[in-house]
Image (tube, grey):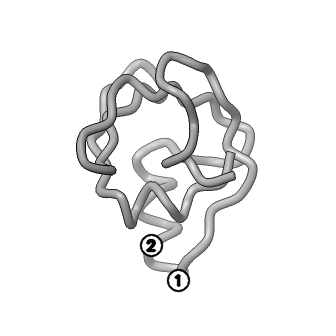
Amino acid sequence: MPLTMAPSGTVTTVKKIHGKDETRRFLESLGFVEGGKVTVVSEMGGNLIVNIKDARIALSKSMAGRIMV
């Protein structure tokens, strides 16, 4: 399922990242790699704030939809 559907407060594991090579490289540079642990902190209007590798990152709905957990 896409990261946008993950419930808040639950630790999930990144399974796959969809999109162009440039998009995948950008997300990998932020810490979104296959097998990485992600926690959704909050959701506002589809946009997410997530914890990954001890950092908080804000993602747009379209970018979060490319991350499968």
In the image, taking residue 68 as reference, residue 3 lies left or right, namely left
Quarter of the view holding residue 6:
top right
The location of residue 11, given as percent across then percent down, is 62, 21
Residue under the point 67% across and 43% down:
14
The location of residue 12, given as percent across then percent down, is 66, 29
Task: Tell me: residue 21, above or below residue 68.
Answer: below
State if disc 2 and disc 1 touch (CB < 8 Å): yes
In the image, taking residue 45 as reference, residue 67 lies left or right, namely right
Q: Where is the C terminus found, in terms of image quarters?
A: top right
Residue under the point 47% across and 24% down:
8
Residue under label 2:
23
Task: Tell me: residue 50, above or below residue 27.
Answer: above
Question: Residues under labels 1 and 2: Cα distance?
Answer: 5 Å
The location of residue 41, given as percent across then percent down, is 38, 23
Q: Nearer the viewer, residue 54 or 5?
A: 5
Q: Amino acid at mark 2?
A: Thr
Residue under the point 54% across and 64% down:
66
Residue under label 1:
20
Residue under the point 32% across and 36% down:
43
* Count of marks placed on residues: 2
**Crowding near the residue tagged with mark 1, few <14, some 14–19, many ≥20 C-alpha atoms within 10 Å:** few
**Crowding near the residue tagged with mark 2, few <14, some 14–19, many ≥20 C-alpha atoms within 10 Å:** some
Helix, strand or loop under label 2: helix
The location of residue 10, given as percent across then percent down, is 59, 19
Q: Nearer the viewer, residue 6 or 13?
A: 6
Kindly give the residue lying farthest to the bottom in the view shown.
20
Task: Tell me: residue 21, above or below residue 42.
Answer: below
Q: Amino acid at mark 1?
A: Lys
Helix, strand or loop under label 1: loop
Residue 62 disc label: none
